[in-house]
Image: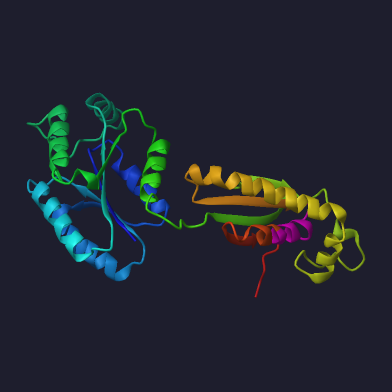
């Protein structure tokens, strides 16, 4: 478990960063006043087993003192829990352009404070925190960074302490081509190249989970080759999907009716990859009922 505090000049991408933490399993709190940080962390640690991601606003005039004091208290109370800070900024030109595009009001601006001055004031407060402990702070500049790249950098930072990172979540489903390909599928494989058990005596009413259908498909020489090729492709693709910040990779396997071949192949693929990913299995057309 770790605690990551997210600071950011408004418009620089603080919400994107917090969302990236949520995607990898952090329990999050958004836009918290620094004066409430200690109590919030204590309450969350008492009820959560996940790492914590908390973004803070700098609206209060006492923000710098409240933030630094809270960090001292939390580090003293939770010695074994790493406390780290992400601070996000962007150039004045970039921030001004983003506010112009979104038509949003900067939280520090008012009738007497123009946008440029509001950005400068917020940035000054954020840069003043932890000035004597710079090693706690990881600075990110998003002036030329896409939201996708920012999410990737936050994820890399958050998982840099992991000595045993969580396995990716692999969703494996079966479907019928006549009902359409699942729209959220990342990888689609076609099991229709296998002999169809539907045309074998006594097998039409069964599914790919039933022993006679399993025995029939296992007896076909092309079945093992197809499953091995699918498993090899998915296995080779997993690192790229993980690096691309995919919290879930959906592999959909289709056949004509989504009942025999696709169900069997999906189960076989689950068995082949269960040691390399957390697997969620389901069958769209013929779900397993208790």
Question: Is 262 one of the magenta-colored residues?
Answer: yes
**Residue 147 as seen in the image, left or right of residue 226:** left
Using the image as rendered, state which of residue 218 and residue 79 is in the foreground.
79
Q: Which residues are magenta?
A: 256-268
Quadrant (top left, top right, bottom left, bottom right) of the N terminus: bottom left
Q: Quadrant of residue 117?
A: top left
**Residue 230 as seen in the image, left or right of residue 111:** right
Judged from this view, the residue extending furthest toward the top is 93
- Image position, residue 99 (x, y; %): 26, 31
Q: Quadrant of residue 78?
A: bottom left
Residue at 42%, 52% (x, y): give it.
Answer: 23
Residue at 77%, 55% (x, y): give it.
Answer: 257
- Image position, residue 121 (x, y; %): 12, 35
Using the image as rendered, state which of residue 62 and residue 218 is in the foreground.
218
Q: Is residue 8 among the parts visible in the rendering?
A: yes
Q: Is residue 255 above or below residue 98?
A: below
- Image position, residue 269 (x, y; %): 69, 57
**Residue 269 as seen in the image, left or right of residue 18:** right
**Residue 47 as seen in the image, left or right of residue 250:** left
Q: Is residue 195 among the parts visible in the rendering?
A: no
Residue at 24%, 67% (x, y): give it.
Answer: 43
- Image position, residue 171 (x, y; %): 59, 56
């Amino acid at each position: 478990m770790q605690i990551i505090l997210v600071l950011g000049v408004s418009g620089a991408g603080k919400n994107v960063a917090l969302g990236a933490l949520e995607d990898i399993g952090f329990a999050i709190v958004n836009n918290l006043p620094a004066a409430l940080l200690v109590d919030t962390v204590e309450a969350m640690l008492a009820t959560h087993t996940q790492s914590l991601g908390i973004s803070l606003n700098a609206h209060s005039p006492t923000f710098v003192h409240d933030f630094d004091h809270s960090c001292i208290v939390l580090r003293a109370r939770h010695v074994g829990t790493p406390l780290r800070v992400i601070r996000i900024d962007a150039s004045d030109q970039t921030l001004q352009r983003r506010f112009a595009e979104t038509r949003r009001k900067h939280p520090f601006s008012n009738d007497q404070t123009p946008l440029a001055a509001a950005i400068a004031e917020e940035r000054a407060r954020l840069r003043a925190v932890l000035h004597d402990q710079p090693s706690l702070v990881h600075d990110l500049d998003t002036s030329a960074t896409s939201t996708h790249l920012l999410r990737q950098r936050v994820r890399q930072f958050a998982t840099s302490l992991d000595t045993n990172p969580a396995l990716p979540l692999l969703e494996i489903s079966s479907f019928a081509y006549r009902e359409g390909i699942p729209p959220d599928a990342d990888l689609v494989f076609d099991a229709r190249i296998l002999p169809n058990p539907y045309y074998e005596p006594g097998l039409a009413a069964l599914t790919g989970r039933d022993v006679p259908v399993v025995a029939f498909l296992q007896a076909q020489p092309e079945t093992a080759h197809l499953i091995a090729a699918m498993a090899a492709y998915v296995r080779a693709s997993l690192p790229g999907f993980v690096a691309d910040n995919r919290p879930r990779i959906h592999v959909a396997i289709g056949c004509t009716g989504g009942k025999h071949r696709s169900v069997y192949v999906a189960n076989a693929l689950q068995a082949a990859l269960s040691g390399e990913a957390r697997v969620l299995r389901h069958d769209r057309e013929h779900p397993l009922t208790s």
